[in-house]
Image: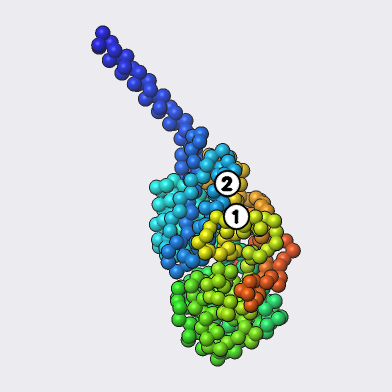
Amino acid sequence: MKKSKRVLALLALLVMLASLTACGSSAANSGPASGGSGKTEGEKIKIGILFSSSGTTAGVEQAMINASKMAFDEINAQGGIAGHQVEYIHEDYASDPATATKKIQKLIQQDEVLATVGCYTSASRQATLPTLLEENSLLVYPTYTEGEEVHPNVIYIGAMPNQQATDYIPWLIENEGKTAFLVGSDYVFPKTCNKQAKILIEKFGGQVVGEEYAPLGSSDFAAIVTKIKQAKPDFIYSDLVGDSIVAFYKEYKQQGLKPEDCPIASIATDEMINKAMGNEYAAGHYTSMNYFETLETPENKAFVDAYYAKFKDGSTITTLTEAAYDSCYFLKAAIEKAGYPCSTEDLIAAFAGLEMDAPQGKIKVDEENHCTWLYSRFAKCNADGIFAVIYESESAIRPEPWPQVVYPELGGKLPAKPY
């Protein structure tokens, strides 16, 4: 009798193991082609958030972290994505591109995220590209970019140069004068943007009278400002980033330069930077962004009110904050369009043509490339430290990568289409 019971128990165990094996095979076959296994009912969708909470760009990126978390919290409160709650996993790459590589590997390989929203500097974004291609994973990148790279595993939510500089530079030449001095941080984004700026300045009858770069995070601008004084330009075209912006503006004023004589025209100075440096240094200077916190749209009012109700950390909403927020909602829409679970290829393809009523206005991901239709706006900082918009496009502008997109991991060769 005992032997019979043991035989029956063994048979029952074999039947159970066979059933589990069959279920596992079925789940694996129904899952994504790459980037993870099939999901069961009620399982959370894992999404990475890759922004710095330490290092020289942490001040800029904190609001991007906040906006991403706020967006996913709102999405979860609304029922999640395709019936699944979002589990977001934040990694701090400490303002260091090499660390960005390690963190994206961790998110993909260990946490098995479906996609990642993140990176601020172009250097950090480019550091993730080999891993994204090797692991066939997706990065949704919120920051404005130099526009000479469109990668098959990246969706670019930030501005292309034609949405930030193409209207801005001729306006500066017409209204401030023909001579410009270029100042930037010493890495890919500023150097590439300044290369393009020189083409535009010359095209519209201007002249570059100086060009200088400072190490990323530098706070010593005495020598550069002295060179500016000697060159006597009509305006300074600046693509300094992070903490260096504050140091540069302060040195500019301390050496006696005035915005009414020679304004700084930036493509990276935002509301948070103004707050950090103080009104006395910010007033009278220009900046070009797709979004400003003061925009009067219903969507922006709801966004601003929700952000400041949720976060009391002293952070300030900027165009990067809005872009990070938009990135999360675009990702949600793409997952739902692709159908969940989905392959990385289907997820990327689903972004094409997606539209959204964002805080800045109606925007969409282009059908032909991985970039986003955005507004062009530029503003002048008033005495209260507020950006007063002096120009805005009537509608979102089609993104135009400049002058030809490059896929670094493909040896510079372009596939027929990014999608």
Could you tell me which residue is drawn at 44 percent across and 49 percent down? 108
Render colour scheme:
rainbow
Position in image of residue 295 (x %, y %):
68, 63
Could you tell me which residue is drawn at 62 percent across and 59 percent down? 304
Mark 2 or 1, nearer chain start: 2
Which label lies toward us, 2 or 1? 1
Q: CA distance from mark 2 to mark 1?
A: 13 Å
Q: Secondary structure at mark 1?
A: helix
Could you tell me which residue is drawn at 43 percent across and 58 percent down? 92
Q: Secondary structure at mark 2?
A: helix
Q: Is there a contact, CB below 8 Å, between mark 2 and mark 1?
A: no
Q: Amino acid at mark 2?
A: Ile
**Farthest top residue?**
1
Q: Residue 75's mark?
A: 2
In front of the other: 8 or 201: 8
**Farthest bottom residue?**
230
Q: Amino acid at mark 1?
A: Ala
Q: Residue 283's mark?
A: none
In front of the other: 165 or 85: 85
User: How busy is the neighbourhood of tag 1: few (under 14 within 10 Å), some, or many (20 plus)?
Assistant: some
Position in image of residue 241 (x %, y %):
51, 71
Residue hosting label 1? 306
Residue 180: quadrant of the picture: bottom right
Position in image of residue 87 (x %, y %):
48, 45
